[in-house]
Image: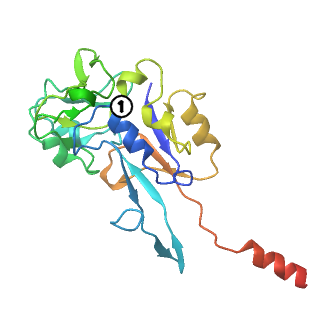
Amino acid sequence: MRYAMAIDPDRCIGCRTCAVVCKNFNAQPQGIWWNRVFTSGTPEYDVAVKVDDQLRMEFVPISCQHCTNAPCVTACPTQASYVDADTGTVLVDYERCIGCRMCASACPYGVRQYNWGKPAQMAGLDDTVYAYGYPREYRDDGHLVYAPERPEGVMEKCTFCAQLTSQGLDPACCTACPGNARIFGDMDDADSAIRTYLDGADREPFTLGDEYHTEPNVFYLASHEVSQVNPLEDAADEKGA
């Protein structure tokens, strides 16, 4: 079994639903985002760039790439970062993490987040505390890889929602995406959703940072070229002819 995700930029509308749902469902502390959405070609979000004299805006969601040859795992001095032997998912054991941030330095994708302090509690109604996220701890073969109340001073990142996928469910970002731009499944299963989608795609899938030789398990599909031909002008030309 090898879990993977496909992201289709042609379907992504840049709404950031994936980022918000991921943050809420995984009880991420303030300032931490496992999922982020960038605008291709510019450091600013939601800014169009000129391509071949035409304005174009394309969104690129980025999270942990769950690399088969994960440099973060190699760099971790305590083996807190590891590749799950059953699914190929890269996970972090909060109880073994010492917060040295060696994994963050080793990650070429800049997706690891450091929990600097005790997460601030959010005020709810009637002087209560607002609780959010999956309510129970989740352990992968004894490793604490999710906790609704995060330990202080640990590294965090996308887990493919291990607390869900262990139950045969899709990650929260895939379920919530309104454009169905994220497809999850088992690459070793020819009938899985991701294999069916990639095998039937009319565009070539690719991975980020091939020069790092990390073998990511997040695949992107090359976007179609944007056409800005005005169909009304074409109709007028045909009528005039």
Residue 130 visible from this viewpoint:
no
Q: Position of residue 99 (x, y in %)?
A: 10, 36
Q: Position of residue 146 (x, y in %)?
A: 26, 25
Instruction: Give the residue type at disc 1.
Output: Phe
Q: Mark 1 falls on what kind of element?
A: helix
Say few, some or many: other residues with alpha carbon within 10 Å of mark 1 (under 14 / 14 to 19 / 20 or more): some
Residue 115 visible from this viewpoint:
yes
Is 46 above or below relative to 87?
A: below
- Where, quadrant-wise, is the N terminus in this rendering? top left
Q: Position of residue 137 (x, y in %)?
A: 26, 18
- Where, quadrant-wise, is the C terminus in this rendering? bottom right
The answer to whether residue 75 is left or right of residue 146 is: left
Q: Residue furthest front?
A: 126
Tell me where residue 135 sits by quadrant.
Answer: top left
Tell me where residue 32 sits by quadrant.
Answer: top left
Q: Residue at x 32, y 28 (%)?
A: 133
Q: Residue at x 49, y 37 (%)?
A: 176
Is 98 above or below relative to 179?
A: above
In depth, the one of 189 and 37 nearer the eye is: 37
Q: Residue at x 48, y 61 (%)?
A: 58
Q: Residue furthest top?
A: 142
Its colouring scheme is rainbow
Report which residue position mark 1 lands on. Answer: 25
